[in-house]
Every structure is written in structure tokens, then in C-alpha cells.
Amino acid sequence: MSNQSPPDRKINRSMGRRLTALIVFMIVALSGTMMVVGYLRFKESAEHYYHRLGETTAAIVALSLDADALPRYLETRAPDQEYEQTMEMIRRAQEKCRGKVFYVFTVADEGINYIYDTEDSEIGEFDPFTSIDPDTGRRKHLYPAETEKQLRAGGRVDTIMGLTQYGWTITVNEPLYGRDGRCLGYVGVDFDVNEVVAELSAYLWQLATIIIIITVFFAAIYLYIIRRIIIRPINIMAKAADSFLLNISKSSQPDDESNILAMKINTGDELQSLAESLKSMVRKIEEYIYSLKLVTIKSETDGLTKLFNRGAFEQRVSAILRLRPEKDQLDAFMMIDVDYFKDVNDQFGHAAGDLVLSECARILRSVVREADVVGRLGGDEFAVFCKNMTSVAIAEDKARLIRAEWLKITPPGAESGITASIGIAFAPQDGRGYQELFAKADAALYKTKEAGRDGFTLSSQL
């Protein structure tokens, strides 16, 4: 049997890492999307809430004020008790609705007059639709032209949001109607959008932080379950399968840790069924391999000596010779005969002859290397192929050692040991194929026999 093992098979076990990364990515993406959508919806809801709050507050204040009495404040230019009570009501309304600025102004043919502003309580003329740039001194409009036109004409406009003298604000203007039903002025309230959103967003980020912590916690638990229930059993089966293939190539027994039949997966699901099916398949494979080995051994080995038979020996030597030899490589092909083996059978019986052949085979296996090929070609004829001998002298020493060891084999009842006749050919000098080397070694063997046996002859001596 071949001692060469197949190259290691590297299995890509990145499924667990990819699954973990995919789950983490999905969780992060979902959490991020939820937070972004939640923030936008939260911001929109906050703006909408303050729109409605401003409208409601300004409307209540507008209904509480006597619009026909407002010109009196402008005429007297002096706050009285009624004015002070009115202003206190407006200040409380501002505190309740948390507006940045609360103001009241009138619109008449002679112009716009400022009645009250929480940032500047002095009464006088005031244009709430324009502002003066402190750097250039130029007056600039705060609202779109159409909106300003409607406001100056005393018309009611929808709540607007834009850049005013107070910054980025939500601005609400509710009309003040006189007894005759005419719009005499406006009650306005401005909310600082940045401040409002920032303040309310703090609660959102606190909530988002809690969501992230909970998400990470459950993600860790989920990944642990995935790894424990799915990835770990798969890795166990993959490792066991690798070990099974490696043990087959090395013809060795698996250890307890990597024995696929000792693999324990008790998940109670499809993975356990798969593991049991894998075990059943391995049992069938092992039975088939065992049967195949028995058939192979029987077909390739000599029944008596357990060496390679003639066909198997030729097949293996030919396979070695087909490989490209190393530089300056020298291979030795030895043909070995037991001298006077027929006399051993005739004098001491076939049982003694079989014992002699078995001992000869044992000695041949002991004196050559594991990588060398030893075979019985038939009868009392043996052959040895020694790969990559460093010199001819080493082959000669090997032949002398075989002769010396065979002399120690004494058949039952005999007085002397067994002698050997050896013929040696070398590759590539004597040939690069099996038949060429066989013919040269066989010719050298007969040269030894003609010289009186009990010796060896090199093919170069022919």
C-alpha cells in the first residue's frame, strides 16, 4: 500500500463569521434606521406641536385682549393698571408656552405700532416685518414678500417657520379683531427651533442609548445562541470529517477528540439528524475501506512471505521510475535467488522450505529502508528496489549484508545456512524502465550462478 498522504485540504470555515457579521450589520443598520427615522419624526412632531401650541396660546391671548383699547396705549404712552394686568397675562402666557418672544402690534393706515414685546417692553413704533442690520445699518425684510403683504394688509396667514430677527424660529401670528370685525393687529409668538429641538432631542438620544444597549445585549445573546446551536455543531462535524479523511490517508486510528463516531451533537433538530446520518455514512465507508483493503492486500501480496507479489512489485517500481529522478540519483535493482532451494525441499520437506522462504523475506524487510520495495517474484526468487542510493558501494554493502544474514538461516536438520545469489542493475545507467532493469539484473544474477553462486554481480561487470 502507498505511504504517500494526500495534500492537506483547507476548509473555509468563514460561514460563522459571515453570519455573525451579517446579523451584527442588520442589527446596527436597523437600529440606525430606526433612530434616524425616529429623530426625523420626533423633530417633525415637535415642530408641529409648537405650531399648534403657538396658535392656541396666541389665539387665547388675542381673545383676552380688548383690541379696540389698544390705540389708547399708543395715545397715552403711559402704562396704566389695565395695561399692566394685560402685560402680566401675556408674560404668564409666554412662560407657559415657553416661547422665545411674545409680542403684540397693531396694523393701521398710518403704519404699524409696537404695543408689547417680552424682550423690549417700551411702547412705540415698530415694524415686526423688517430688521436693521447692525453692521451695515440697512433694513431687511424678515418674511417672504407675499406673507409680508398679507400681514401689512391685516390679513390672516398660516403659521410660518423661517429665519427672522430672532434666528431660526417657528413664528405664529394670530389676528386681533375689533368689535366691528376688522383685523386691528396681531398677537405673535416665536419659538427658537434649535433650542426646542435640541432640548427635546436630548430625551430622544437618551432613549436611543437605552435602545442601543438593549439591542446589543439581545444581539449578544442571539449570537451566542447561533454560535452554540448552529455554528458549533457545524464546526464539530467539519473537524471530524477532516480528521476522518486524514486518518484514512494515514491508515491510522483517530483519537477520541476527532473520532467522528464519537462526535456528540444533541441539538434535537436537523443538525443532530445530519450528524447521525454522517456517522452512518462513515460506518459504511469504513466497512467498504476495510473490505477493499482485504481484497487489495490479498491481490498484491504473496500469501507465504507477505511481500509484494510479482505484479504488485512491478507496478510500484514502474511508478517510481516514471517520476522525474533527482539530480545524480542512483537506484539499485537487485534480483536475489535462494541457492539450492530445491535440495532443501527434497531433503527436509516443503514445510522447511516454506520456513526458509519466510525467514528470507523477514531478513529482506529488516535490512532495507521503509521506502524501498521488496517482492517475491516466484518460487525462491526475490527482488529488492532501493531508491536513491548515494553510491554503488552502498548497494554492494547491502548485498553483502543480505548474504551474511541469510547464512544465519538454517533449515531444520541442516548443518549449514542458506546462501544467496544476487544480480544488481542500476538506474539510469542500465535503463530507465522496469523491463530494462529487470533484464540487466537477471543477467547479472545468472552471471553469479555461473561463477559458483553465493555472491553478487554488478551489471557493469557483464
Image (cartoon, rainbow, N blue to C red):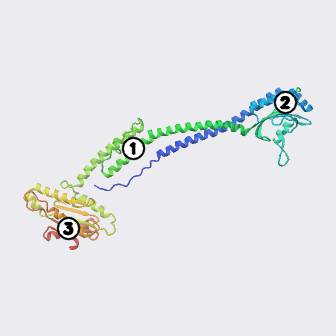
In terms of depth relative to the viewer, which is nearer, 442 or 274? 274
Bin the neighbour count of mark 1 within 10 Å (Cα to Cα): few under 14, some 14-19, many 20 and up.
many
Q: Amino acid at mark 2?
A: Leu
Q: Earlier in the sequence, mark 3 or mark 1?
A: 1
Label 3 and label 1: CA atoms lie apart by 54 Å
Residue 89 figure quarter:
top right
- In percent of width and height, residue 141 lies at 83, 43
Q: Find out whether the residues at labels 3 and 1 contact each other: C-beta distance under 8 Å.
A: no
Q: Which residue is mark 2?
A: 176
Point out the frontmost of discs 2 and 3: 2
- In percent of width and height, residue 201 lies at 67, 37
Q: Secondary structure at mark 2?
A: strand
Q: Is residue 96 visible?
A: yes
Q: Which residue is mark 3?
A: 423
In terms of depth relative to the viewer, which is nearer, 268 or 278? 268
Point out the frontmost of discs 3 and 1: 1
